[in-house]
Image: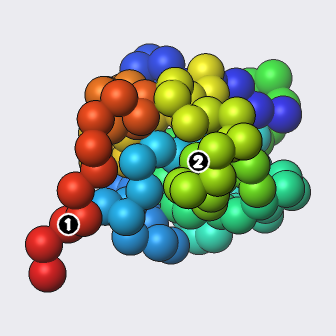
Amino acid sequence: MSAIPQEGDLTQEAEIIWLEDPDDLDYVRQALDKVNTRRGKPRYERDGRLIGYSNLLPNAPRSPDSGLFARRTFYLLPHDRPNQPDDPKCPYKVGSPLEAVDPRTVEAGKAGQKTPRSQGTTEIVPARS
């Protein structure tokens, strides 16, 4: 089960772990998933690829309803713009999915935000080396 994270859902986050460089992506999808661990790479069962995830504080409580931990995952589906930047048939050539955010706005404990970059309305300039 996953949901779009709200600020109040993220108070137990300790850190964000990126499996890919977020500066190379104009958006990622974020979801709040119920998992059985506080830390480490969570199981990923979507199409596409896992880009990052959150680790929780050592004393983060389990959900009283499910007994699981709510952790954020960041991912891309095969048809997302960062996977197909030059494909004119890409469904998100401009705009982005509801759950998409600019990965450069993501911090532990704070929901990511949409930006002109994540919406595809500005030119994407590669990060400097």
Q: Residue furthest left?
A: 128
Tag on residue 81? 2
Q: Quadrant of residue 41?
A: bottom right
Task: Answer above or below: position of 94 versus 27.
Answer: above
Looking at the image, is mark 1 or mark 2 earlier in the sequence? 2
> What amino acid type should be assigned to the residue bearing mark 2?
Arg
Label 1 Cα neighbours within 10 Å, binned few <14 / some 14-19 / many ≥20: few
> In the drawing, does residue 127 fall left or right of residue 65?
left
Q: Position of residue 65 (x, y in %)?
A: 81, 23
The residue carrying mark 1 is 127
Residue type indicated by callout 1: Ala
Kindly indicate whether the residue at mark 2 contacts the one at mark 1 (C-beta within 8 angstroms).
Answer: no
Q: Is 94 rendered above or below residue 85? A: above
In the picture, measured across the screen, residue 55 lies left or right of residue 102, that is right
Which quarter shows the N terminus?
Answer: top right
The residue located at (51%, 29%) in the rendering is 94
Nearer-the-camera pick, 26 or 21: 26
| Along the line of sight, the residue nearer the viewer: 115 or 5 | 115
Q: Find numbered disc 2 in the image and state the secondary structure of the residue it sits on.
A: helix
Query: Which residue shows up at 59% across the image and 70% down it?
Result: 40
Q: Is residue 33 above or below residue 45?
A: above
Name the residue at the front extreme.
88
Residue nearest the viewer, comparing 86 with 37: 86
Whether residue 13 can be seen here: no
Indicate the secondary structure of the residue bearing disc 1: loop
Q: CA distance from mark 1 to mark 2?
A: 18 Å
Using the image, tell me which numbered label, if any, was put on residue 11.
none
Compared across the picture, whether 76 is left or right of 118 comes to: right
In the rendered image, residue 38, in percent from the top left (x then y), is placed at 59, 56
